[in-house]
Image (cartoon, helix red, strand yellow):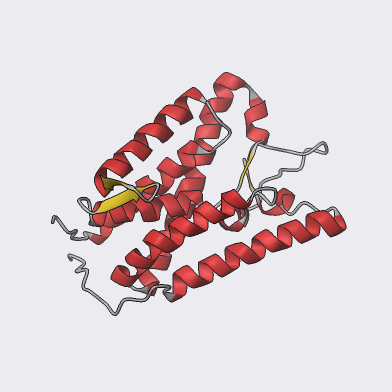
Amino acid sequence: MLMELRPRGYSILPPIVKNLIIINVLFFIATFIFQRSMNIDLNQYLALRHWGAVDAEGTTLFRPWQLITHMFMHDSRSLGHIFFNMFGLWMFGSIIENRFGPKRFLQLYIYAGLGAAVVHLLMLTVESQYAGSGVLYTSAIGASGAVYAVLFAFGYLFPNSLVHLYFFIPVKAKYVIMALVAYDLFSGLTGTSNIAHFAHLGGMLTAFIIFKIWRIRYDSA
């Protein structure tokens, strides 16, 4: 069955996007407060850890809930980390939620976040074969995997729509997505930063698979 995307009443801040932003901000504030006032690092419990990472007593550091909670954690030392993720979620997520409706949008967001986590963990497993087991002890936080899925959704649905880079440079959405894929693939393979590039790619790949399952029609204009 083809999924028809029909125009809905437009909301500048639809409910799922609004609540996701609120939850992310609350997690950010809680992380800051716990760290500063009680010297408790919530990342130790809520950040995504590899299933092969263990503590000094041999207890695994991975917990199933981390597959979800890592999506709402951000670096408490950097406002930029959460700001740009939430800005992208609002800017593009509002458009996608207005097209899909709250239920479908939430499914896309959560499934893409899970897909991003799985791809990231699998790539850590592969990388550990070449770089040693130390890479398994890294942790991942942030909504980027799910947000990149939202960016992909916009580029997939509206490939010829213009995105103004730095608010001035107009570029078609499909080229922005191509550039992001190329950048993350290159950076992930060369290891040029501590960003989880394969999580970004995993989020976009999951969105692509979901769209194929839903058999979504997109705008060609």
| Picture coordinates of residue 196, whole percent (x, y) | 53, 38
Residue at the bottom extreme, as displayed:
9
Q: Residue at x 35, y 33 (%)?
A: 182
Looking at this rendering, what residue extends furthest in the right direction?
38
Could you say where residue 142 lies in the image, as x and y percent from the top left? 57, 50
- Residue 205 vs residue 36: left or right? left
Total numbered badges shown on the rendered structure: 0
| Quadrant location of the N terminus in the rendered image | bottom left
Foreground of the two, 134 or 22? 22
Residue at the image position 51 percent from the left and 40 percent from the top: 120
Please give the name of the residue rendered at 80% of the width and 54% of the height, measured from the top-left corner: 35
Q: Is residue 94 placed above or below 81 in the rendered structure? A: below
Residue 104 seen: yes
Position of the C terminus, as image quadrant, is bottom left
Image location of residue 133, percent across then percent down: 65, 26
In the image, is 97 to the left or to the right of 57?
Answer: left
Q: Position of residue 124 (x, y in %)?
A: 55, 33
- Closest to the observer, 39 or 59: 39
Q: What residue occupies the far left of the structure in this picture?
A: 221
Observer able to see residue 209: no
Q: Is residue 5 left or right of residue 185?
A: left
Which residue is at 82% across, 55% downward?
36
Query: Taking 88 as reference, is 67 left or right?
Result: right
Compared with 102, 123 (above or below) is above
